[in-house]
Image (spheres, rainbow, N blue to C red):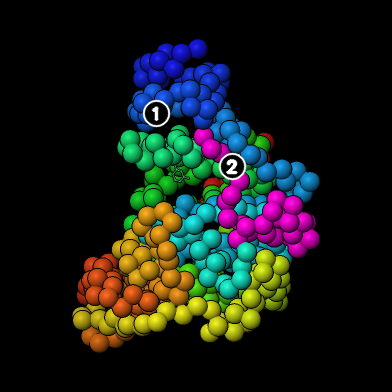
Amino acid sequence: MRMYDIIEKKRDGYPLTDEEIRFFIQGYTEGSIPDYQASALCMAIYFQGMNDQEISVLTDAMASSGDQVDLSKYGHLSVDKHSTGGVGDKTSLVVLPLVASLGVKVAKMTGPGLGHTGGTVDKLLSIPGYRIQLSPEDFSVQVSRIGIAVVGQSRNLAPADKKLYALRDVTATVSSIPLITSSIMSKKLASGAKNIVLDVKVGSGAFMKSPEDAHLLAEKMVHIGQMCGRNVTAVLTNMNVPLGNNIGNALEVKEAVGVLRGEVFGELRDVCEELASNLICMAFEISPEKAASMVRDAIDDGSAYRKMLEWISAQGGDIRTLEDLSLLPKAKFEYDICSTHNGYITKMDAERVGITSVILGAGREVKDAPIDYGSGIILYKKAGDPVSIGEKLCTLYTDREDKIPEAEKMFRSALTIGFTKPVPQPLIYEIIRSKKS
Ligand code: URA
């Protein structure tokens, strides 16, 4: 088999065979196929697309290119959650202990944040003492014992995707549905869970800007996951504005704890309940209504919050900082931004708000850059809210006082204030479930 022929075949619009796809992934991962041929094939896929059989084989080949976590001993009870990334997205901190408190098994590997969206690893590391690395044995024992362990991704999961994604990033071939689908789903398959909920963010702060594009991607990921033997549900959620009010690591932990304690209501709790209900619905094969009521009860009776304390404590985290949130890391400087106009916030660009938090030190623009756990933003007003001159819009938190003017400029550029109250946008656009086979 020759890579040249595979590129030519896809360039001319023909489907590749299973063997050709596996030859490509194996050769590229090993290094026998060079970057220039891999990028030519990605570009051919970008223009010519792939059918479902090709995508499922590509996904499976990438998932099999490295370590694969075996959760088969938990049968149909293992669950995983993936978010395509958004600003203020702390849903994992709520959803994972919430579902674990209902008896499913969460064995989660997660990554640090890059760019304007935060990562779960950084949020967890803002809890003093939290151990983000566990040995594979300790990880497995903890999942069996308390139903949940969340670690940073250290294992060699889907190395083919890692290499290919870096290549796509510099060859303008990221935004191709077959390539995104196989990239995301290969990592989910390698992580081993039987039931997967995908939080597909839609809007200005997200990777998918329109509900139509998000629908196409979500439908494909659900279908390919099912072809590869997993139950998958995609929930399309709004990311035109940040989720919830707090952005930044320790600030997001505070808000997540508020939801689990039954003290924070609104959009954040609603999205978390939806994601959690869909996992419970798949794992226990019960109706969405029954699952939703179990999820609500687990928050209301305190079991979800108790599970969070048990989990954080098992991983070395100091739970006094959760019981008394004022003990979490705090930024040195606080700065209020007030409205200079009367009217309504007609737009709050989530991406720019996310960039503001990066300027303040809550996120990183380049890999391995240091971050300040106490930095970030608390929003008091969001899109649709009325504002008047002098009213507080948000507080900025930072250790980098010199960055405040730049952060204020970026935050103000995220807002549009007008005279007409904007039409409310949906929080959840759509839910796409695997079809029963
Ligand atoms: N996220 C991924 O993991 N892969 C993609 O291709 C795009 C977003």
The answer to whether 367 appears left or right of 432 in the picture is left
Expressed as whole percent of the image width and height from the top left, the position of residue 411 reads: 28, 70
For this rendering, which residue is in front, 80 or 27?
27
The answer to whether 118 appears left or right of 138 in the picture is left
Residue sitting at x 55%, y 33%:
62
Residue 4 vertical position relative to residue 170 in the rendered view, above or below: above
Residue 219 vertical position relative to residue 272 in the rendered view, above or below: above
Circles 2, 1 touching at the beta carbon (< 8 Å): no
The stretch of residues the image draws in magenta is: 132-160
Can you see residue 70?
A: yes
Residue sitting at x 33%, y 35%:
171
Alpha carbon distance from label 2 to label 1? 20 Å
Asked where in the image residue 241 lies, by quadrant, the reply is bottom left
Label 2: few (<14), some (14–19) or many (≥20) C-alpha neighbours in 10 Å:
few
Q: Quadrant of ligand 1?
A: top left
- Which residue was labeled with disc 2? 156
**Secondary element type, mark 2:** loop
Residue sitting at x 40%, y 19%:
7
For this rendering, which residue is in front, 153 or 200?
153
The quarter of the picture where the C terminus appears is top right
- Which residue was labeled with disc 1? 35
Asked where in the image residue 365 lies, by quadrant, the reply is bottom left
Residue type marked 1: Asp
